[in-house]
């Protein structure tokens, strides 16, 4: 019995020193996101080293270029919300799922969105390689549902407002898409 207890305590001690608890000295910057009660999100950023090591943050989604990234909670967090019968998590998740499905379908089918990539992530960290102030790392621990829009050299936009329609208005506004084609500053 004593050997078993010592073995369990040893495993417990080693698990407390997980590599995810350590800071990565290769990073010079991390973005910290906070959400205020009115659903507006603020991001505090500091520049990150341009080299992103292969071993950096195992629970990470890396994006670049014109991108719309939809955020959902991971299965553990979702499961914890289901423990409260009054949380409304099933309805919120269903509405958001419908919205992102409609948005992704429209972006993939319409020519005016041909340069925009989309995906859904449940991962905690997001690295954006080529936005303004890039590369940028976001710890989205406080964001369960939302979308991040990014484009090369442009400030990112995070939307945490949930609804049951598509998000094409937000995409059109962020990427300056009008009358079926994408416009850039100074070009029409």
Image (cartoon, grey):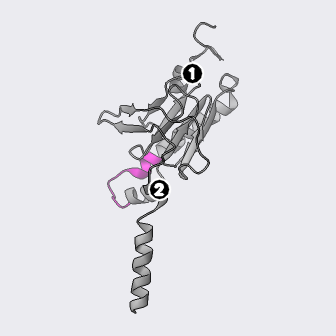
- Horizontal and vertical percent for residue 48? 50, 35
The numbered disc on residue 61 is: none
Badge 2 marks a residue whose secondary structure is: helix
Dividing the image into 4 quarters, which one contains the C terminus? Answer: top right
Contact, CB < 8 Å: mark 2 with mark 1? no
Q: Secondary structure at mark 1?
A: loop
Q: Position of residue 125 (x, y in %)?
A: 49, 45
Q: Residue at (37%, 50%) from the top-left corner?
A: 88
> Alpha-carbon distance for marks 2 and 1?
35 Å
Residue at the extreme bottom: 1
Residue 128 location (% of width, % of height): 55, 35
**141 magenta-colored:** no
Label of residue 20 in the image: 2
Residue at (43% x, 56% y) in the render: 21
Residue pictured at 48% horizontal, 53% vertical = 74
Q: N-terminal of the two: label 2 or label 1?
A: 2
Residue placed most toward the observer, 65 or 69: 65
**Residue named by callout 1:** 175
Of residue 10 and residue 126, the one placed in the foreground of this image is 10
Q: Which residues are magenta?
A: 83-93
Instruction: Say which of marks 2 and 1 sits in front.
Output: 2
Q: Is residue 86 visible?
A: yes
Q: Residue furthest left?
A: 37
Q: Say whether residue 165 is visible.
A: no
Q: Is residue 144 above or below residue 113?
A: below
Picture layout, residue 40 above or below residue 96: above
Which quarter of the figure has residue 130?
Answer: top right
């Amino acid at each position: 019995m004593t050997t078993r207890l010592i073995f369990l305590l040893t495993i417990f001690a080693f698990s407390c020193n997980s590599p995810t608890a350590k800071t990565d000295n290769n990073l010079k910057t991390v973005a910290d996101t906070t959400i205020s009660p009115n659903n507006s999100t603020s991001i505090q950023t500091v520049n990150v080293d341009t080299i992103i090591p292969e071993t950096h943050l195992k629970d990470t989604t890396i994006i670049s270029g014109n991108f719309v990234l939809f955020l959902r909670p991971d299965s553990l967090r979702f499961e914890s919300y289901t423990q409260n019968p009054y949380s409304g998590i099933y309805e919120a998740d269903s509405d958001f799922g419908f919205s992102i499905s409609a948005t992704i379908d429209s972006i993939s089918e319409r020519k005016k969105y041909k340069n925009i990539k989309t995906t859904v992530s449940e991962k905690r960290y997001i690295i954006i390689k080529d936005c303004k102030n890039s590369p940028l790392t976001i710890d989205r621990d406080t964001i369960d549902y939302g979308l991040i829009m990014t484009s090369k050299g442009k400030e990112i936009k995070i939307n945490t407002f949930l609804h049951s329609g598509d998000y094409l208005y937000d995409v059109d506004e962020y990427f300056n898409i009008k009358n079926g084609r994408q416009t850039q500053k100074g070009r029409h």
